[in-house]
Amino acid sequence: MNGVHDMGGMDGFGKVAPDAHEVPFPAEWQARSFALNRVMGSAGEWNIDVGRYWIETLPPAVYLSSSYYRKWFLRLERLCLHLNLVSERELASGHSSGPGRPLKRQPLSGPHAGASVSRPNHDQPPRAPAAFAVGEKVRARNIHPRSHTRLPRFARGHVGVIERIQGCHTYPDAMVEKGVKQGEWLYTVVFDGRELWGPDAEEGATVSIEAFEPYLERP
């Protein structure tokens, strides 16, 4: 989807200025939001791709005015409402009105909860050999799916070169749209800056993206 989250190549947001002394959670609620998201993620009700989609579909004004962990918190609220894990009244009151429905998996808790911080392996068995080889020219397809996609808008329609084959992994688009774990080959594709931005691109600039096989075609 062409949402507000797809900001690559856009002007007007200023430079990223990381704080060398930044602590992970400046406020306690941020750590709680992180922990709640990780624990609920271990319950098997959604995966990382679905979680990303529910952040991407925040209203643009909310997305742009929310901090990183506020987006996580809002995503958690929206998913729990959507999956009937909580009601609007329970959210407003801050109290449960009764036992909730059974979860797909028992969430990790106590000393086991730390395991949810590690991301699971998304490797999948290939259904066919990789269609493209290292060094081959490819064009990022000009697609605009209404659901989730990891193909950035700035790369669509442009020609790059396969730099590396990263293996076969769960295809996020199919996971969100169809709810299926479909394995697709993943490639690192490098683009010349002038191919993406034209003559105004910085001299010698290149951009690399991770692109699944369905995103690519031969030019």
Image (cartoon, grey):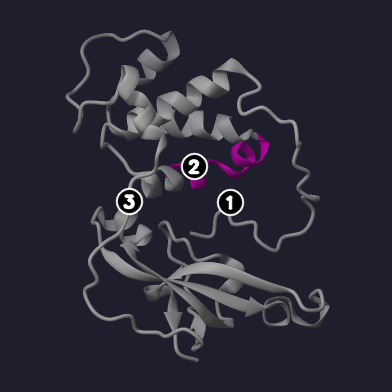
| Marks 2 and 1 in Cβ contact (< 8 Å) | yes
In percent of the image, x 68 and y 82: which residue is there? 195
Secondary structure under the numbered disc 1 in the rendered image:
loop
In percent of the image, x 54 and y 60: which residue is there? 2
For marks 3 and 1, give the one nearer the viewer.
Answer: 3
Q: In which quarter of the image is residue 93?
A: top left
Range of magenta residues: 54-65
Which numbered disc flags the more N-terminal residue, 2 or 3? Answer: 2
Secondary structure under the numbered disc 3 in the rendered image:
loop
Residue 206, visible in the rendered structure: yes
Q: Position of residue 14 (x, y in %)?
A: 81, 50
Which numbered disc flags the more N-terminal residue, 3 or 1? Answer: 1
What numbered label is drawn on residue 5? 1
Q: Where is residue 121 in the image (x, y as percent from the top left)?
A: 32, 51
Up/down of 136 relative to 51, above or below: below
What numbered label is drawn on residue 121? 3
For label 2, the residue is 55
Q: Where is residue 4 in the image (x, y as percent from the top left)?
A: 60, 51
In percent of the image, x 75 and y 41: which residue is there? 18
Q: Which amino acid does label 1 sit on?
A: His
Give left or right: position of 23 versus 174: right
- Disc 3 crowd rating (10 Å Cα; few below 14, some 14-19, many 20+) is few
Give left or right: position of 188 versus 107: right
Alpha carbon separation for disc pair 3 and 1: 25 Å
Q: Which residue lies furthest to the front in this view?
A: 111
What secondary structure characterizes most of the magenta part? helix
| Marks 2 and 3 in Cβ contact (< 8 Å) | no
In percent of the image, x 58 and y 51: which residue is there? 5
Q: Which of 93 and 51 is in front in this view?
A: 51
Secondary structure under the numbered disc 2 in the rendered image:
helix
